[in-house]
Amino acid sequence: MELYALRLSFSEQDLNELLRKYIPKDTEVEDLRLKLADHAVHITGIYPFFIPVRFETIWELGVEAGHASARLTSFKAMGVPGNIFKSAVVKIVEDIAKHEHWIRIVGDRFLADIELACAKYAVAAHLHLKSIQVRTGMVLVEAGH
């Protein structure tokens, strides 16, 4: 299947429902939530370290060579920048990526081959991903020739 024009919008609610549906059940993070603001994706949750640690990550989304990209731009644990906890939370994302052949890690970015994801979960298609824009409360995705 070849895609000639596509414009999708996902609300925060849509993405939070997808997150709850597809996050592995054995993920240690609790109270995981996604918010769309300031041209970025804010993800918060609680990680059970020695004590429950509330964290917030901020991700910048984009498109690189036809793949969706996500780069971690900010991390806070218990309200302050926290490099100790950052590696634990990033490891969770890396562990999830290991089980999905359509996600890979390149430097400080996660790249997702959306065509491979579609083939796995829906239908094989040539999407020609063009842009991903984060706006307050929604993500806009454009693809096609």
Image (tube, rainbow, N blue to C red):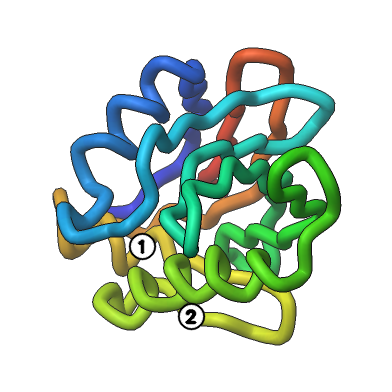
Task: Determine whether 35 is above or below 43 in the image.
Answer: above
Q: Where is residue 107 in the image (x, y as percent from the top left)?
A: 72, 85
Q: Of residues 73 and 105, which is closer to you in this image? A: 73
Q: Position of residue 130 (x, y in %)?
A: 64, 49
Q: Of residues 35 and 47, which is closer to you in this image? A: 47
Label 2: which residue? 104
Q: Residue at x 47, y 23 (%)?
A: 10
Q: Which residue is drawn at 58% across and 41% down?
A: 54
The amino acid sitting under disc 2 is Arg
Q: Of residues 122 and 69, which is closer to you in this image? A: 69
Q: Give the class, few, some or many, for how many residues have Cα within 10 Å of label 1's Cα (few <14, many ≥20).
A: some
Labelled disc at residue 52: none
Image quadrant in which you'd find residue 136 = top right
Q: Nearer the viewer, mark 1 or mark 2?
A: 2
How far apart are the alpha carbons under marks 1 and 2?
14 Å
Label 1: which residue? 115
The amino acid sitting under disc 1 is Glu
Q: What element carries label 2?
A: strand
Q: What element carries label 1?
A: helix
Q: Which residue is drawn at 57% across and 69% down?
A: 90
Q: Position of residue 93 (x, y in %)?
A: 46, 66
In primary-sequence order, the first of circles 1 and 2 is 2
Q: Which residue is drawn at 42% across and 73% down?
A: 103
Q: Position of residue 69 (x, y in %)?
A: 63, 61
